[in-house]
Image (spheres, rainbow, N blue to C red):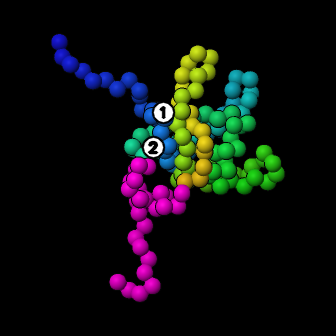
Amino acid sequence: MSRETTDTRGSNYLEPGIHVKLTIDHVEKGHTTGNHPYYTFYFDTPTGGKWNKRFMVWLCPPILKALGCKETKPGVFDWDTDEVEGRAIEADSVIETVKGKEYTTIINIEPATADREAGDDDEFGAGPADPPEFDTPV
């Protein structure tokens, strides 16, 4: 007999109960069997992992606003799935229960703050920092 530590969370895991910065890897559009449209957002996490979440279109406004997508009139957005790749958001991860099954989702979705996008090494994880700009040669 041997002692084992097994991570059963899989590769699509986001720890619940934290404030997190997520970067868009890519977005895919799909339709349910009832032909209702949805978008699946694929994220890179600060820990180097991947996480994805499906949003029915009526749940998309907070994330589309946080990604800087243009709202042409209330509830109508003009955006390109390729153009949001690499953009970051911040949100709180929580557990939601749907039909008796628990899932991790995000709430309080906001644009990522500029200092975090610049790569400060903080609780949101390290990222590539831009070199400082100087008026005179260094």
Give neighbour class at mark 2: few <14, some 14-19, many 20+ (Cα, 10 Å).
many
Please state which of residues 12 and 136 is positioned toward the viewer in this rendering.
Answer: 136
Residue type at mark 2 is Thr
Residue found at the far left of this picture: 1
In the image: residue 3, left or right of residue 96: left
Q: What residue is disc 2 on?
A: 45
> Which of the image's four quarters has the N terminus?
top left
Residue 123 rendering spot, x and y as whole percentages = 41, 49
Residue 38 on the magenta segment? no
Q: Residue at x 41, y 73 (%)?
A: 132
Question: In which quarter of the view is residue 72 placed?
Answer: bottom right
Q: Residue at x 54, y 22 (%)?
A: 102
Residue type at mark 1 is Pro
Give neighbour class at mark 1: few <14, some 14-19, many 20+ (Cα, 10 Å).
some
Span colored in magenta: 113-138
Residue 81 rendering spot, x and y as whole percentages = 63, 48
Residue 107 rendering spot, x and y as whole percentages = 60, 39
Per the image, label 1 sits on a secondary structure element best described as loop
Residue found at the far top of this picture: 1
Q: Is residue 89 visible?
A: yes
Please state which of residues 114 and 52 is positioned toward the viewer in this rendering.
Answer: 114
Q: What residue is disc 1 on?
A: 16
Chief secondary structure of the magenta portion? loop
Residue 120 on the magenta segment? yes
Give the alpha-carbon distance from disc 2 to disc 1, as whole Å: 13 Å
> Which of the image's four quarters has the C terminus?
bottom left
Residue found at the far right of this picture: 73
